[in-house]
Image (cartoon, rainbow, N blue to C red):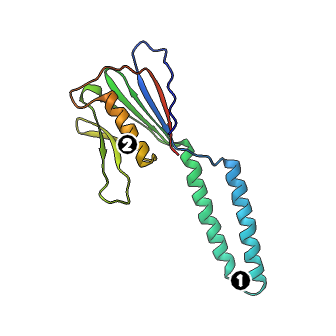
Amino acid sequence: MSVATTGTEQQEPIYRVELRPNCALTPGAALLFFASLCLVSFSIAGLFAAQGFWPVFPFAGLEMAVLAWALNASLRARHVWQRISVSAEQIVVELRTRVTYERCVFPRHWAKVTLRASYTALHPSRLLIESHGRACEIGGFLTEEERRGLAARLKQVIGTTSESPPLETRGVDQAMAR
């Protein structure tokens, strides 16, 4: 997780964390990768079909369809971001995907940061900001270590219920999942 802090020009002190998944695969690279695998897969399937093993073609097509679906899902993750902004009065959590936008606002004095352990060892923990019976999950794409680090930073800034520590940090943390 890389972190960069910069000042803001607003009068009120603000602490902001922006989260984005690490998506190193570009659309052009995905297309090149998919085309090269299609070429290899269908060439091999063609050799087998020429020898009379024609059922190989549908399975090669199915493999390439599943690969196309997986690459599309990976490329869609590039459009996801989450922003947590903390001011003296409130906490604003913004969640954006390619098609949806969600904004949750919590009073800072009554909000708390919770890192809930999963019920099984195979599932990651959940990082929540909660207040007045409402909760907003953040950092679902982060690794467990990054999620714990973010929880610790947010607990320092937000505090516990009925506690609002002074905002000494002015700036933006850019957190990139790896």
Relative to 170, say whether 83 is above or below: below
112 vs 4, left or right, is: left
When asked about the image quadrant of residue 112, the answer is top left
Q: Is residue 98 left or right of residue 168?
A: right
Left or right of 27 on screen, residue 168: left
Residue sitting at x 77%, y 79%: 47
Q: Nearer the viewer, residue 49 or 16?
A: 16
Q: Of helix, strand and loop, which one carries label 1? A: loop
Farthest-out residue, left: 162
Please name whichever residue, 16 or 143, is drawn nearer the observer in this view of the structure. Answer: 143
Q: Amino acid at mark 1?
A: Trp
Is 72 left or right of 7, judged from the image as shown?
right
Q: In x, y percent, where is residue 140?
A: 42, 47
Which residue type carries mark 2?
Arg
Give the residue drawn at x 71%, y 70%.
41
Q: Residues within 10 Å of mark 1 (few under 14, many from 20)?
A: some
Residue 77 place in picture, x, y as percent: 54, 47
* Residue 177 seen from this side: yes
Which is in the foreground here, disc 2 or disc 1? 2
Q: Depth check: 21 or 136 in front?
A: 21
**Distance in Å between CA atoms under marks 2 and 1:** 52 Å
Q: Position of residue 150 (x, y in %)?
A: 40, 38
Please report contact status of discs 2 and 1: CB closer than 8 Å, yes or no: no
Residue matched to label 2:
148
Q: Secondary structure at mark 2?
A: helix
Question: Pointer 1: what residue?
Answer: 54
